[in-house]
Image: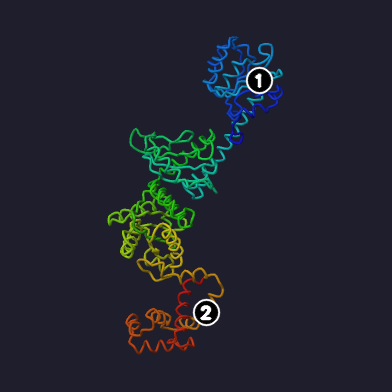
Amino acid sequence: MENQGGITVRRALELPGLRGGLPEVLTGEDQLDRPVRWVHAGEAPNLPALLKGGELLLTTGLGIAARPADQRAFVRKLAERGIAALVVELGPRFPQLPAALVDTARAAGLPLVQLHREVPFVTVTEQLHTELVNSHYALLRQVEEVDRRCTRALLDGGGVPRVLRTLAEFAAEPVFLEAADGRLLYAAAPPGDARPDPLHVWEGLRSGRTAGRDRPPSGAVVVDVPGGSTAPGAAGSVRARLVLLPVAGRLLPVHRLAAERASGILAIVLMQARQEEELAARGRGDFLHDLAEGRIAPEDAPAQARVLGFRPGDGPMLPVVMRLANPPEGLTPGGGWAVLVRAVAEELAAVGVPALLGVRPVEGRVPVLAGLRTEAERTAVAGRVAAALRAGLERTGLAASPAEGAAGRRGPVVVVGGAGGWAAAAAGLRHAAQTATAAQGLPDQPWYDARRLDIDLLLWRLRDHHDLGAFVDRALGPLLDHDRRAKPPLLPTLTAYLAHAGRKAETARELHLNRQTLYNRLARIAELLGTDLDDPHTVLALSLALRARRHVP
């Protein structure tokens, strides 16, 4: 408690002023961690009426009546007021505390402490007040530090997720941001937290609230994030709510203060257009990423997906990943991702494809899980999802044009993994995400099948290995040197020839060459490379070299 800017009854008894009185705890030993809001000394019979709660009450008992019934009433009223503890100095009034006082305090769960030595109450009061002021100052310093970290997270580009994770780390409890209508926008857990995923916690919370308890559990911190409307007279409306749940322990006043500071930061961010949509899309992207990385078990995934609004039915699921090689500068947290997500969701809803769509802005990835009725739908649905992703990117106005691609900015790559249940979907998302990076150098097409790109993925993983570059130089070096010095270039001819598995007629048609010209070029390529283009081992080596060349720096 002291670390959170407060004083407990236990701490007060450890201070020199009270420790010198040889304090003895008679009742409420399990309540000594109660916070002390203030300290008060008095002897009046009507003391309970003067208190507000949270006080440490010092008395010699002169104001306590002699009758046991009055003593019991006195203690009950103090307990009802919610004082932190009753400290009685033994002396002429009470050489020992009456049984009525002790029994009533024990029944009420009120800490009752007797002092065996006389102490100056003014000294005790000064010490406790000094400790309280220092503790409140420490509390404010903690809140200021959290506020500074949240602001820095925002300025560094971390956005709302980093702000929420900072708050979750400080409170050591899960933090949720919900829309004004109760929809979950984002969930954050403390770093390294081994407790249940926050989406599980949220599902339990929402099921309890929809069952008739439309408020968070006792001990939770709920802070409104203002700014939900710009309509006249709606200045105080709620845009979202920040919710901290006491899963492992107890939330303290300092946590509420930190949440209130964070709500002001969040209000500023959420005032930007479409931030709630984008935040929810990031939350779904984090879920899909954690599923792919094995941080969410397949058996836990369906319940968490339902929290995010995804109910695919009993059929298999199709993992799809779109990757932007160089995310355009305009596709930032200001709303571009939200426009993309909304556009894709509308396209897929129009063709009846249930989908869970998320975004990973840092990696420039858009992961998707689409629901299939049967495995036979895989190709058709893959085409619809890929078309929706590309159309959605076009609707943002930020898709790279061919000219831009030629200048170094490539268009998006869409990769489709294998369909199946939750375990297969997790593996498929991971495979598709890795393959999407490796597919950046491939010829453009609507979508790629991750199952057919394993060689490219392997070569991409070896891209920084010296032997791979040396292999490309040995296999293709003379041909590349020729193309740098002379025309026409011969590498396109070799590429087309290998793509058509050595079928010369099809190669000639693709290159718009007559057969004799093609034969002359193939002969020249064989001469430069010193090899036989009809040899299967040579064909395999050259095919691998052409693929590897896309990935070698």
Name the residue beneath numbered marker 2. Answer: 473
Question: Looking at this rendering, what residue extends furthest in the top direction?
Answer: 66
Image point 48% across, 74% down: which residue? 548
* Viewer-nearest residue: 362 or 315: 315
Image point 35% across, 85% down: which residue? 504
* Residue 33 locus on image (x, y percent): 59, 30
Is residue 207 depicted above or below 33 in this figure?
below
Name the residue beneath numbered marker 1. Answer: 114
Image quarter hosting the N terminus: top right
Residue type at mark 1? Gln
Is residue 225 depicted above or below 489 in this figure?
above
Specify few, some or many for label 1: CA neighbours under 10 Å numbering under 14, 14-19, or 20 or more: many
Badge 2 element: helix
- Closer to the eye: label 2 or 1: 1
* Residue 462 locus on image (x, y percent): 52, 70
* Residue 495 locus on image (x, y percent): 41, 79
* Viewer-nearest residue: 335 or 294: 294
**Residue 178 numbered mark, or none:** none
Residue type at mark 2? Asp
Is residue 476 depicted above or below 265 in this figure?
below
* Residue 141 locus on image (x, y percent): 59, 36
Residue 414 visible (yes or no): no
Whole-number angstrom distance, CA of label 2 to CA of label 1: 89 Å
Badge 1 element: strand
Q: Is residue 374 left or right of residue 74?
A: left
Is residue 223 depicted above or below 535 in this figure?
above
Q: Is residue 142 left or right of residue 390?
A: right
Q: Is residue 149 left or right of residue 391?
A: right
Specify few, some or many for label 2: CA neighbours under 10 Å numbering under 14, 14-19, or 20 or more: some
Quadrant assignment, res 327:
bottom left
Q: How many tags in the picture? A: 2
